[in-house]
Amino acid sequence: MIRMIKFSPAALLLGAVALLAGCERPPIDSVQSGFRGTGMVQVYNPRTMAVQIPQNQPPAPPPPAAPDGPKAKDVFQNVKVLGDVSAADFTRLMTQITAWVSPKEGCNYCHNPQNLAEDSKYTKVVARRMLQLTQHVNNDWKQHVAATGVTCYTCHRGNPIPANVWFKPVERDNKSNFIGDLAGQNLAAPSVGLASLPYDPLTPYLKEDKPIRVYGTTALPTGNRSSIKQAEHTYSLMIHMSNSLGVNCTYCHNTQSFSSWEGPPQRATAWYGIRMVRDLNGDYMEGLTKTFPANRLGPHGDVAKVNCATCHQGAYKPVYGAKMAKDFPELLTFAGSKNVAAALPPPLSEAMRSVLYFDVGSAVLQGEQAKGLAQLIASMAGDPKAVAVISGYHSAAGTLDQNQQLAKQRAFTVRDSLLAAGVTEARVKLEKPQSAEANLAGEDPAARRVEVKVSN
């Protein structure tokens, strides 16, 4: 016999109140970024922001030092990056880097206290390269960091190892997989916000240069590689970017047409940011693999790499756009790259051939070179049958692997610009990096070029 238990309305109300008391009502704030009714709105949780904002407040800069006086290279030994700044500015920056990177360990984190000039500690070798990386970002990636720039604090925030670096993840065990290749999905990984999307959005897009696309721009089978599988990998990267910046999709995309570039300017900024991260991982981080001890490498023996969260750490702009770099001008200019742009020859723009020149150590086209790229894009857009064959060149001097990597990144810059402008993948072909004429120095502009041959 089943006995029915009746509850009074008052008891039901009290029970509901008790149940809801254990839940947290989310008082969400929203900021409209487009016309009403178009879904262009950013959503923020005030309680999350209450934690986030104090964590993104930059420290006060130290008083400026005297820019005159003897240079650092004339006072200190083995100064390879900042030798041309004054000794006072050099000491000021070193003191600040200690506070930014190793406040507990102090100078001894990088230096041998018995001989500060020697390079016996791997951390000093890495720090020197990271100074060059910081200068490179501020000098050559203004399309992403603009005049705000970055400093060592942007990533480190008082930690010797930045909180948000990544290694290639360990592959899942497929021994008990009876339903085929799951393509890294259905793991609810933190890297993709516990979604069932592919758990590694970083290796294919922030280390390699796999195409980031949801749907194709041409009908099958004309070079259209887009598929549901590829779209899901793209979405995994978008989740990473959303979590890293603390924003939703409409921060970069136009909800009326997500593929359209006629929307928030942040989409172009993000486009350059993806290519900047690839550049940093390929040309700076991976080159340090043999410098790090085994305990600092990942499960595959790879070096720690950067991603969007490394700098942003949950904020739409790192440290909410605080212009820290302006207080440290020695971090704004890449050593050896002064006046290089003025020495570049003008871009060549012919009917069937274009040549574009790059600054030393840079994979970014600026000034007249960017105008030359725009002419190439217009030419390709005006002839739907035209096919572009892109060749990156590098110097015959220096390290071959590094030269080839930089030549490849420069070729990618031109290729990706064409694709972003709507030129289909089938009309853009890449050739292997090629060496410029024999014995050219790295400072010769002819060795820092990309050639594009156009044919019908």
Image: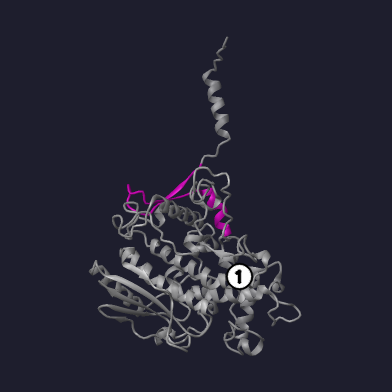
Question: Image point 57% across, 85% down: which residue?
Answer: 85
Which kind of residue does numbered mark 1 sit on? Answer: Thr
Hey, which residue is sitting farthest right in the picture? 114
The residue that label 1 is drawn on is: 289
Q: Position of residue 168 (x, y in %)?
A: 56, 60
Q: Point out residue 441 in the picture as x, y percentages from the top left corner.
A: 48, 88
Position above or below: 427 against 66 = above
Q: Quadrant of the N terminus?
A: top right
Q: Does 50 lie within the magenta span? A: yes
The C terminus lies in which quarter of the figure? bottom left
Decide whether residue 51 is among the magenta residues. Answer: yes
Question: Residue 101 vs residue 335: left or right?
Answer: right
Disc 1: CA contacts within 10 A as few (<14), some (14-19) or many (>=20)? some
**Label 1 SS:** loop
Q: How many marks?
A: 1
Q: Position of residue 27 (x, y in %)?
A: 49, 43
Q: Is residue 213 above or below residue 1?
A: below
Could you say which is closer to the camera, residue 25 or residue 111? 111
Q: Is residue 327 visible?
A: no
**Rendered residue at 42%/81% (across/down):** 448
Residue extent of the magenta highlight: 26-55
| Residue that lies at the very extreme toward the top in this rendered image | 1
